[in-house]
């Protein structure tokens, strides 16, 4: 019987394309070890994005492929994941306890950005990541209502606030600190200072991702985020409607100007399916998000339907990913979450923490 070679195994593995990385795992440097002991092969795979929901199926696909190699009688495939810190804007201080910050933005209001942000955070968490969400909308905070949380943040040291926990998410919002019906009548400088304090004075605990739910537009808060917050990448939420796409383009160009990479575009309210007869209709137009992604050469992360349940779930404080975890909408959010994590994993890594500080002393 012919010896099984490493090259044979690698060649076989290259035939399987990871749908989220959109490349094979050998090229993505996700194959960490191939051990060959006669007719037995064992493979260790380490993905760079949270993958609890798919790792068993992926391991089975890889095992079947390796078993098809002539001479292989037994194959063991182990799939895990490890999320690392990625590069951010130059000269911006890191946030203790946070590996990666993902800004969720839209050019205009009313496109379901906050709903998308909280479900994206919950989707990443459901796949095994440690996730937090920062509600950066000082004038109209909505995350406390969406997360069904109304606790006042505690402080253990008198200087920093403990994040409020809900559905395994660490969260912080101005909405936890003021009455829900109290209007924030603040000028721009006070708003940006409040955002910085919420971000830096919260004691985040070992987060793989911090999702920042931005207010709509391209104003003070977005500029503060670009200049002072270490953002790994941005996600743009739009609807297929031309007016929404016009404003979404402004948001995308703003991130380009401040050199924050755009991970991709999510199209919300993509299609409406009648709950009575099942008729599907593109009431806001069709394919606008995909065309925009192609125009600006960014990834199209997915499309979500206009669904009454999504609105009811978030208004009720149980977003769809936790309210109906096995449903179709939750699966779409999970798919989008994996694409976000996978695309981010391919970005440049931040090695600053790997190097010791060099101190020069006079002796």
Image (cartoon, rainbow, N blue to C red):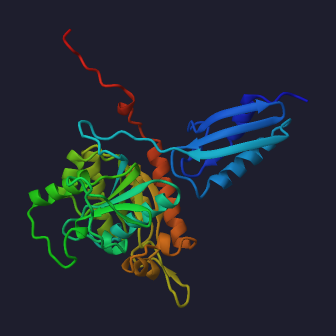
Residue drawn 47% across the image and 59% down it: 125
From the top left corner, tell me how far across and down residue 160 is, in percent. Answer: 24, 53
**Would you identify the image quadrant in which residue 167 lies?**
bottom left
**Would you identify the image quadrant in which residue 195 lies?**
bottom left
From the top left corner, tell me how far across and down residue 192 is, in percent. Answer: 16, 56
Of the pair 293 and 359, the residue shown nearer to us: 359
Vertical order, 86 against 285 (above or below)? above
**Left or right of 126 in this view: 77:** right
Of the pair 99 and 110, the residue shown nearer to us: 99
Classify the position of the C terminus by image quarter: top left
**Left or right of 183 in this view: 134:** right
**Number of numbered discs visible in the structure rendering:** 0
From the top left corner, tell me how far across and down residue 324 is, in percent. Answer: 53, 75
Which residue extends farthest bottom?
Answer: 276
Which residue extends farthest right?
Answer: 1
From the top left corner, tell me how far across and down residue 41 is, in percent. Answer: 77, 36
Residue drawn 37% across the image and 79% down it: 315
Visible residue check, residue 134: yes
Classify the position of the N terminus by image quarter: top right
Of the pair 76 and 164, the residue shown nearer to us: 164
**Left or right of 124 in this view: 182:** left
Visible residue check, residue 106: no
Residue drawn 30% across the image and 73% down it: 150
Vertical order, 27 against 341 (above or below)? above
């Amino acid at each position: 019987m012919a010896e099984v070679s490493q090259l044979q195994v690698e060649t076989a593995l290259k035939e399987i394309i990871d749908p989220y990385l959109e490349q094979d795992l050998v090229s993505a440097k996700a194959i960490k070890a191939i051990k060959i002991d006669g007719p037995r092969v064992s493979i260790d795979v380490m993905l760079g994005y949270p993958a609890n929901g798919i790792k068993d199926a992926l391991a089975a696909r890889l095992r079947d492929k390796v078993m098809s190699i002539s001479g292989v009688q037994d194959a063991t495939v182990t799939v895990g994941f490890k999320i690392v810190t990625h590069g951010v804007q130059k000269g911006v201080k890191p946030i203790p306890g946070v590996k990666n910050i993902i800004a969720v933005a839209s050019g205009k209001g009313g496109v379901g950005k906050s709903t998308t942000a909280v479900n994206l955070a919950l989707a990443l968490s459901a796949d095994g990541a440690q996730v937090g969400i920062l509600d950066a909308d000082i004038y109209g905070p909505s995350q406390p209502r969406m997360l069904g949380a109304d606790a006042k943040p505690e402080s253990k040291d008198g200087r920093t606030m403990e994040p409020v926990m809900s559905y395994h998410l660490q969260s912080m919002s101005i909405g936890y600190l003021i009455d829900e019906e109290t209007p924030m009548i603040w000028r721009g400088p006070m708003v940006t200072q409040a955002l910085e304090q919420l971000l830096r004075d919260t004691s985040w605990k070992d987060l793989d991702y911090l999702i920042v739910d931005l207010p709509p537009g391209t104003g003070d808060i977005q500029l503060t985020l670009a200049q002072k917050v270490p953002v790994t990448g941005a996600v743009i939420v739009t609807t297929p409607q031309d007016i929404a796409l016009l404003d979404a383009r402004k948001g995308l160009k703003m991130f380009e100007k401040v050199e924050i990479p755009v991970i991709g575009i999510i199209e919300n309210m993509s299609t409406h399916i009648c709950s009575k007869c099942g008729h599907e209709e593109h009431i806001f137009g069709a394919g606008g998000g995909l065309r925009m992604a192609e125009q600006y050469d960014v990834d199209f992360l997915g499309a979500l339907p206009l669904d009454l349940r999504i609105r009811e779930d978030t208004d009720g404080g149980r977003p769809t990913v936790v309210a109906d975890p096995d449903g179709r909408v939750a699966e779409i959010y999970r798919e989008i979450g994996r694409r976000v994590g996978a695309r981010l994993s391919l970005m440049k890594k931040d090695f600053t923490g790997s190097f010791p500080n060099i101190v020069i002393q006079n002796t």
